[in-house]
Amino acid sequence: MKAVCSWKEHVAFILMFIIGCNTSNSLTGQQVCSLCGGSVLNRTAVGQFCSGFAGLIDGRCCLKNDSSGDHERIIGLDLSNCSLTHVENLQEASEVIMIDLSLNPIVNISADVFRGFFYLNYIFLPEDVVCPGGNTSWQKVEVKQGNRLCEGQKDICNQTGHLSLNCPENSLCAPDGPGFYECSCAENYYGYKCLREGEFPALQVFGPLAASTVVMSLLLWATQRRKVESHFTTRLTETDSSKREC
Ligand SMILES: *[C@@H]1O[C@H](CO)[C@@H](O)[C@H](O)[C@H]1NC(C)=O
Ligand SMILES: *[C@@H]1O[C@H](CO)[C@@H](O)[C@H](O)[C@H]1NC(C)=O
Ligand SMILES: *[C@@H]1O[C@H](CO)[C@@H](O)[C@H](O)[C@H]1NC(C)=O
Ligand SMILES: *[C@@H]1O[C@H](CO)[C@@H](O)[C@H](O)[C@H]1NC(C)=O
Ligand SMILES: *[C@@H]1O[C@H](CO)[C@@H](O)[C@H](O)[C@H]1NC(C)=O
Ligand SMILES: *[C@@H]1O[C@H](CO)[C@@H](O)[C@H](O)[C@H]1NC(C)=O
């Protein structure tokens, strides 16, 4: 009977965990779109862009109208006139194409905020905030009516004369947001700076690791078990002696 109860408790716990995760997911799905009140207005840059894409407006977001996709992709984000002093986490909108951050008292934005923003092609900023990744990461930088527009994200992997930015030999460069790139070893190369050639020796590398993990776990299990037992026996003798004292 007791075993059944604890089994039910486990299921309830797991269910609560799953439900908790789901609700937090759906909340974060809206978070960036409701960072401040109002919704995307038709006459704004994001509004025009959105109607050009036949997107759906949800608060401050423009969502791609894609019934096949299992997640709603944010393609436009209008956080203009939002009283934002700093911008930290926009990961929910990592596939965004246009962002408007104008008319906010932002001083500077860490470049890391836009790491992985591969599709970002238009960003409106307050005049004094520099473009993420610097001017060189954009095809066009324009200051107009108190706003800075960074337009056309450059492919950092396709720039001649920037040898220091390039990946080592035998590796492939992939853009990873304004000013960022990633290097991955070309086929048949691996290791530090992709200097080793041939198949990655998975068994030789992970085999000993797996074996030592098993040994360590067994050792830990054995020692912990002994500790628990010895602890238990000392407790028993203690209570025995106290009883005797009484
Ligand atoms: C927004 O503007 C577009 C043209 O720019 C127009 O086709 C559309 O009907 C407008 N939508 C609303 C809600 O006013
Ligand atoms: C979204 O797309 C579906 C089918 O692709 C279409 O029926 C629907 O009218 C679209 N919604 C808007 C608001 O454009
Ligand atoms: C910014 O928002 C305030 C109130 O939230 C409004 O009064 C003001 O007109 C807005 N400014 C612009 C340029 O839209
Ligand atoms: C702006 O950036 C500089 C250097 O990256 C940093 O030291 C400073 O604290 C930042 N200011 C704000 C207000 O975030
Ligand atoms: C970046 O471009 C803008 C607009 O062209 C210009 O005003 C600014 O001085 C440039 N910044 C740097 C660091 O080159
Ligand atoms: C690489 O750059 C050249 C010239 O700068 C351009 O013509 C070409 O389209 C670019 N290729 C890609 C894949 O961006």
Image (cartoon, grey):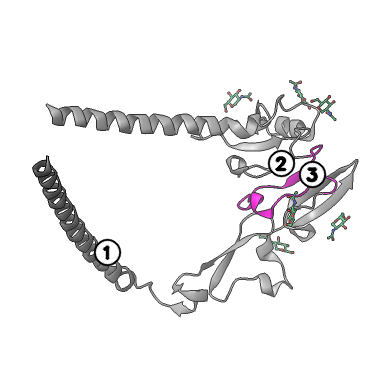
Find residue 230 and report its image quarter.
bottom left
At label 2, which amino acid type do we have?
Met
Q: Secondary structure at mark 3?
A: strand
Q: How far apart in space, not on screen, are marks 3 and 2 (Cα)?
A: 11 Å
Q: Are there few (<14), some (14-19), or many (20+) residues within 10 Å of tag 1?
A: few
The region drawn magenta spans 102-128
Q: Earlier in the sequence, mark 1 or mark 3?
A: 3
Q: Quadrant of residue 208?
A: bottom left
User: Crowdedness of circle 2 by 10 Å Cα count: few (<14), some, many (20+)?
Assistant: many
Q: Marks 1 and 3: which is nearer the front?
A: 1
Q: The N terminus appears in which quarter of the rendering?
A: top left
Front one among 60 and 215: 215
In magenta stretch: residue 110 = yes
Mark 2 residue's CB less than 8 Å from ligand 1: no
On the rendered structure, is 139 left or right of 144?
Answer: left
Q: CA distance from mark 2 to mark 1?
A: 48 Å
Q: Which residue is mark 1?
A: 213
Residue 74 on image: x %, y % = 62, 36
Residue at x-position 80% and y-position 31%: 44
Q: Which residue is mark 3?
A: 125
Q: Quadrant of the C terminus?
A: top left
Number of marks in the rendered image: 3
Name the residue nearer the viewer: 132 or 97.
132
Toward which corner of the image does residue 168 lie, by quadrant?
Answer: bottom right
Q: Which residue is mark 2?
A: 98
